[in-house]
Image: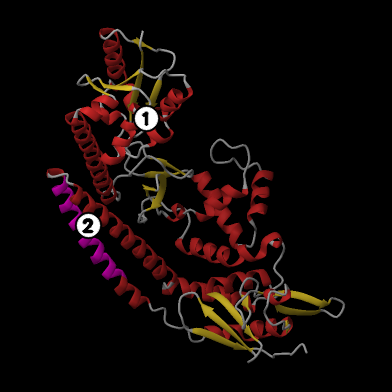
Amino acid sequence: MTKAYSYLRFSTPEQMRGDSFRRQTAMANEYAARHGLELDDELTFHDLGVSAYRGKNAEAGRLADFLEAVKAGLVPRGSYLLVEGLDRISRLKPRRALKVLENIVDEGITLVTLNDGREYDTDSLDEDPLNLLLAVLTFIRANEESATKAARLRASWDAKRAASETKPLTALAPAWLRLKEDRTGFDIISDRADVVRRIFDMTLNGVGQHSIEKILNAEGVPVFGRGSQWHRSYILKILDNPAVVGTFTPHAVEYEDGKKVRRPLEPVKGYFPSVVSEDVFQRVQAVRKSVEPQRGRHAKAEISNILGGLAKCPNCGATMTRVSKNKAKGWVYLVCTKAKSKAGCQYKAVRYDAVEQAVLERGTDLFLDLPSSGASDLDNQLQSIEEHISDISERGKNLLDELAMNPSPSIRDRVRTLDQEIEVARTERTAIKEMIAQASGPLIAQRVERAKEALTATPVDRTTINRTLRELFSEVVVDYKTGFLELQWHHSNEPASLFYEWVDSD
């Protein structure tokens, strides 16, 4: 008796609980009984919750396993593959979908579509042009249906985003929040929020992530979730997460070369209740950005260089590190790391004590005349990009309406182009907003006051000085040719200069 195999597929796991599984199974059993086929109940090929729109079932799913079983002899040639419809095996572009069908019949398999009882094999496709045309038309319709559904889902998601100020997009929330019972927002879990604030406070006080991990574990602070202990990686995720200041970053799933890629969309500010102030969050990012890549295995050690992570070589721009040449006499120098490792830069040692003395004695002079942030230009850029996004969105809505009436390939291509254009614009808008936040007058003023306090405090706290300087400056070029320290502000392109008593090591 000729063997038959049932292939079931549906794209969402929820359909398993509905009628789709029962319907496809019943149709396969009925067809096999009516045509005298032996339906194999042991060797089954089901792609449950797998989409055919991207071809996952044919490339790595159970449909691919079926073809492999045929080639291996587990499924005899001449067998039947029973599917509800051609759209079950593929919703790819018609040309690629036809290849999926051809791959099946070329292995000597007859594919039966149970919804119309039509049989596809090499003879019917080669000798009956109508059968081939019908397959192509079916694949065209299936692909267009999936493309239209995807566009509508994007439109639905955009509508949810527009209403996100009054209603959460999803029930998902960071570990220190929970969805309200009426689903209108989120409540703060106070004990967990306290832990989050403490992690940020310790980071600002110079405590590294490994040390924070040990402190929390030693004190028996309950972990968030099902873990048994705190880990540095999770602490890092908390420090990186803009949700602590109330910002939610949704993601869109895209496909590149057949691979699924999650792309961040425009952040939604004020979506979550904040548990950390914007100022604290930005300060922590500034500290981590400048110190973590440089300190490496010395991250836990007390900072002895007030320009640690900031000092740069005037020749090549590489970091300058603190080295001791004569510990007995206390001679300490700043040296270009590139020159030190003999990587090509000129070796020049600058007396560290002269640099530190200049910063401690005259560092507050840097704040007598703060440069303009250029925020007005940024505001103009933000307004321009907002108008651009509004224009794209309006065109997109009109195209989606047009697509619903006429799902043609040309309209779909225009929708796809607009999708890409609006994501680029949203990314640009996010970058501008971040620059405006960095250039905020009140934030800069607060950081300047902290730096003044650190520079004038007794005894000298180099860790605090280093941290406050990193909040304000991105780098300090130690120009031994002129005897000046050239400091670059975070919020402005205008540099600041500070003279130091340069002592030539030669």
Residue 4 placement, left or right of 359: left
- Nearer-the-camera pick, 187 or 199: 199
Quarter of the figure with residue 267: bottom left
Which numbered mark, 2 or 1, is in the foreground of this view? 1
> Which residue corresponds to the image point at 29% horizontal and 7% vertical from the top-left?
36
Label 1: which secondary element: loop
Task: Report the span colored magenta.
Answer: 382-403
Q: Residues within 10 Å of mark 2 (few under 14, many from 20)?
A: some
The residue beneath circle 2 is 393
Label 2: which secondary element: helix
Position of the N terminus, as image quadrant, is top left
Would residue 9 be visible to someone looking at this image? yes
Chief secondary structure of the magenta portion: helix
Furthest residue to the front?
A: 127
> Which residue corresponds to the image point at 64% horizontal and 57% vertical from the top-left?
208
Residue 10, percent from left and from top: 32, 28
**Magenta-drawn stretch contains 469:** no
The residue beneath circle 1 is 49
Circle nearer the N terminus (2, 1): 1
Quarter of the figure with residue 48: top left
